[in-house]
Amino acid sequence: MSNYNINTICVQGGYEPKNGEPRVLPIVQSTTFKYESSQQMGNLFDLKEAGYFYTRLANPTNDAVANKICQLEGGAAAILTSSGQAANFYAILNIAGAGDHVIASSAIYGGTYNLIANTMKNMGIEATFVDPDILPEELESKFKPNTKLVFGEILSNPSLKVLDIEKFANAAHKAGVPLIVDNTFPTPIFCRPFEWGVDIVTHSTSKYMNGSANAVGGAVVDSGNFDWEKYSEKFPGLTTPDETYHGVVYTKSFGKAAYITKMTTNLMRDLGAIPSPQNSFYLGFGMETLHLRMERHYENALAIAKYLEKHPKISWVSFPGLENDSQYALAQKYLPKGTCGVVSFGIAGGREAAVKFMDSLRLAAIVTHVADARTCVLHPASTTHRQMNDEELVAAGVSPDLIRISVGIEDVRDLIADIEQALEK
Ligand SMILES: *Cc1c(COP(=O)(O)O)cnc(C)c1O
């Protein structure tokens, strides 16, 4: 299936029923799996045989959907998590621990910023945040002997900064560490980060991937390209025996699946952030139309961005698809077919006018969510980013008057009419 074009993988990837099996991916809503002998079960525990025994470690519905995402990204192995937060947490924790250091772009989702700046710091993992526009030499100077990875967001939520992927990948690889990126906003329809040198991709599948806002979820995909053994001293967890798992050496036993297998046997085993098979079913079902939805999200968002740009009551518009946008050149390079459906803008009259405008909308709903079929609006400074002080807000590219509109796949004429009447008020 992975040889097919991406639109075909959206529809049919991940699950290929055999003769007489259900055409639609079954929801295997079972914690456990039955075996005839203890010996057989023992072999599964020892990773000597592949098979299911407990859903925290593997489940057929979850695996099929992970497989679809893996194929869409062109990766070697993938795992689903119960949320995007869990995906980013696991992606980092799998190769960094107390005493280690990571480098992250400052233009990232507020939840990921908190995770890295606070929770992981409390766990002993130090972080250096860098401006995504940092010069290559300056970026290289941020690495330390204990730096284990570089993290960024392909298209940042909500500031819509496009990551200069090659710049970050080059710096990471020069220092012998992988580049991990969150590809939530573009989805593999608009960007396939592995083709630009990224090593590991994460997703909040709660957004476009699911598409209907009916299940929180996440995913981690490994390209299989990073040479852990070459930098063995940095990544002993992957290249030396894991005494907590029968002395297995992940790179030796699992090759390109080493990183994801370790994530399953260590992090899922011990922390357990798995999705329910029911939620994975919703995700797989949603992804059957991902390619169609992304095109319409982008088309509608571009039309709204152009409308807002010309409106006298709008002080600024940020959308990487607009030719005069600061991110346009990077978007043309990395996201030539489209960016996403999210547009940020500021209303003349600042914070107060923003709230009045939002309260006047009828079709676009105020929700703490983005990136689903229904248009919605959010004021990040008073919601998702409220933990940040003004300085941190600016560093993350979020101004106090910023309104984020997540343009859905409704008829764009109705959406513009709704904005029009709200602006009149
Ligand atoms: C929403 C989001 C997350 C967090 O995902 P959840 O599924 O809400 O836990 C992480 N990264 C980005 C870019 C997001 O938009």
Image (tube, grey):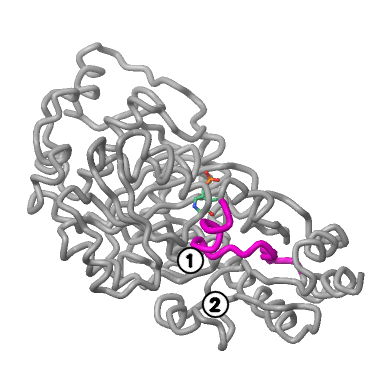
Magenta-span inclusion, residue 220: no
Q: Residue 265 sits in which quadrant?
A: top left
Q: Identify residue for label 1.
A: 155
Residue ID at (54%, 63%): 394
Q: Which amino acid does label 2 sit on?
A: Pro
Using the image, determine if residue 68 lies above or below residue 141. above
Q: Residue 316 sits in which quadrant?
A: bottom right
Q: Where is residue 382 in the image (x, y as percent from the top left)?
A: 69, 51
Left/right placement of residue 140 relative to residue 218 reads left
Q: Identify residue for label 2.
A: 320
User: Front-most of 368 and 375?
Assistant: 368
Pointer 1 local density, CA inside 10 Å: few below 14, some 14–19, many at least 20: many
The N terminus sits in image quarter: bottom left
Residue ID at (53%, 72%): 339
Left/right placement of residue 363 relative to residue 233 reads right
Residue 408 visible somewhere in the drawing: no
Residue 390 visible somewhere in the drawing: yes
